[in-house]
Amino acid sequence: MLAELIEHLSLERFVLFGHSMGGSIAIGLANQMPARIAGLILVDPNLHGGGGILSRRVVAYTERSYALHGHVELATELAAQGHPAWAETWRRANAVALHRSAASLVKGTSPSWRDTLAALHLQRTLIISRDYGREDDVALLARSGVRVNPILDAGHFMNLEQPLALANAIRLAVTS
């Protein structure tokens, strides 16, 4: 669908940004249409199947059960854990689309998103939080030419925790 939207909008060259699950989607899209991607900026992307904690929680429900009550339950949990903005974003998402996206993320791809990212021949930046881990993946990506920019005083929700640091990292990625 994103590729169709890009075609419809006649976007020729653009910088693509993705966070978490969106990072995996961005890697796939960049691989699908690399000539149009002027740069790829990823924040804590999923690089392998298996998903993150929330994706695994989503797919623990059947699609129907998630749409009926799981979606609201997880949004309520996010708010209770001190993430009200994230919870509101979650609430606004389409429950069925979120479940299907999470299922795809947990399933993964072959080759992995990491290997696809490493093989892309375009400007790539990986912005990582203190919680990201995956040191071997980060090292492999750095060796393949991916610029790595850690924001160590922020967790996975760095857009909420350290928005200025994230904005500066994005600016640096776009302008260099």
Image (tube, rainbow, N blue to C red):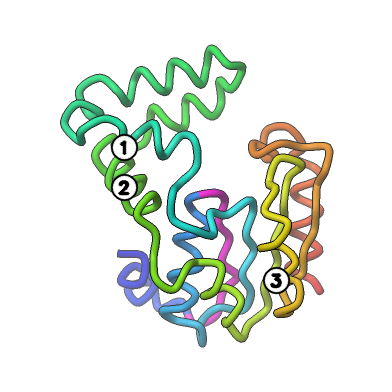
Residue extending farthest left: 64
User: In the image, is 131 to the left or to the right of 95?
Assistant: right
Q: Which mark is residue 140?
A: 3
Specify the segment rendered in magenta.
12-20
Look at the numbered disc 1 and give the secondary structure of its residue: helix
Screen quadrant of the N terminus: bottom left
- Name the chief secondary structure element in magenta: strand
Q: Dot 2 corresponds to which residue?
A: 103
Q: In the image, what residue type sits under mark 1?
A: Val
Cα distance, mark 1 to mark 3? 29 Å
Give the image location of residue 43, x and y in percent.
64, 53
Q: In the image, what residue type sits under mark 2?
A: Ala
Q: Residue at x 69, y 71 (%)?
A: 141
Cα distance, mark 1 to mark 2? 6 Å
Q: Dot 1 corresponds to which residue?
A: 59
User: In the image, is 80 to the left or to the right of 41?
Assistant: left
Q: Is residue 56 magenta?
A: no
Are the residues at dot 3 and dot 2 in contact (C-beta closer than 8 Å)?
no
Q: Quadrant of residue 107?
A: bottom left
Q: Residue at x 53, y 54 (%)?
A: 46
Are the residues at dot 1 and dot 3 in contact (C-beta closer than 8 Å)?
no
